[in-house]
Amino acid sequence: MCFSAEASLGVAAALLPAGAYAVAAARRKDRRYLPLAAIPVLFGVQQLCEAGVWAGLDRGDPEAARAASVGFLFFALAVWPAWVPVAVATVESDGRKRAAFLALAAAGVLVGCVYYLPVAAADGRGLNPAVVGHSVRYDLPAGPGAAWVWPAVYLVTVAGPLLLSSDRRLRPLGFAVLLSAGIAYVAFREAFASVWCFLAAVLSSYLVYGLYRHPSGVSASAGPAPVL
């Protein structure tokens, strides 16, 4: 699998209009789904940022690549670990699960503070994005404590709510997110952030399909699961 500016632009070109449809469908059918519907749009913008990283690297312009990296990592490190649990909590019918998902969102905000604030404060200096094995590697700060702690917290915040949601239609996406993380880690460890976000962006199209199938005015937990 080869990644490039064209690959990122292609995913963005597909996700932005598809995400716009998902947002419109959520507004029409069930407004609780608006935060979930926005995820493909946000991934589209993130992929545009990574296309900017590729363009900067291709031109031999490290400053442009670092500036685009700051935008890409804003989504990777600050947005997703907080947005996903909040979005799932918004559609959750079980009060205890909703509270747990919001607690995970708070943990996600902490992850963003640990990883993204140093990046933003330094204006991307120290990231030094580079192409490794046809993917982009970012020299991210390690964060305090054991090397596995914060990545584990991150994974729980983005996959846990999807897997545990009372809306059973979100659970396949949670499993797919875990699987994509494993694939990215095993096959593209040095460029894990770039590859996993790319795979997750593609997976977010499942939300567009789910909103297409979601009946108007019917609770997600009571509605029929879509046939994939």
Image (cartoon, rainbow, N blue to C red):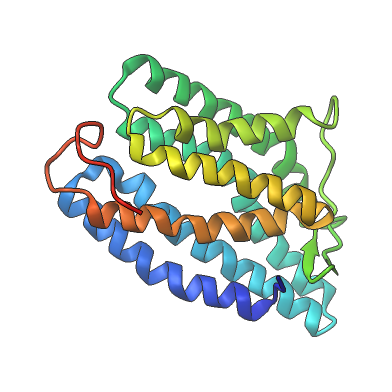
Instruction: Pick whichever, 173 or 78, lies toward us.
Output: 173
Residue at image point 47% right, 76% down: 13
Instruction: Pick whichever, 121 or 82, lies toward us.
Output: 82
215 relative to 161, above or below: below
Where is residue 76? Give x, y as percent. 63, 50
Where is residue 65? Give x, y as percent. 76, 71
- The quarter of the picture where the N terminus appears is bottom right
226 relative to 82, above or below: below
Residue extending furthest top?
96
Residue at image point 44% right, 53% down: 39
Instruction: Pick whichever, 214 or 87, lies toward us.
Output: 214
> In the figure, residue 49 lies in which quadrant?
bottom right
Residue at image point 76% right, 78% down: 56
> In the figure, residue 18 lies in which quadrant?
bottom left
- The quarter of the picture where the C terminus appears is bottom left
Where is residue 40? Give x, y as percent. 44, 58
Residue extending furthest left?
217
Where is residue 129? Give x, y as percent. 82, 64
Residue at image point 46% right, 35% down: 162
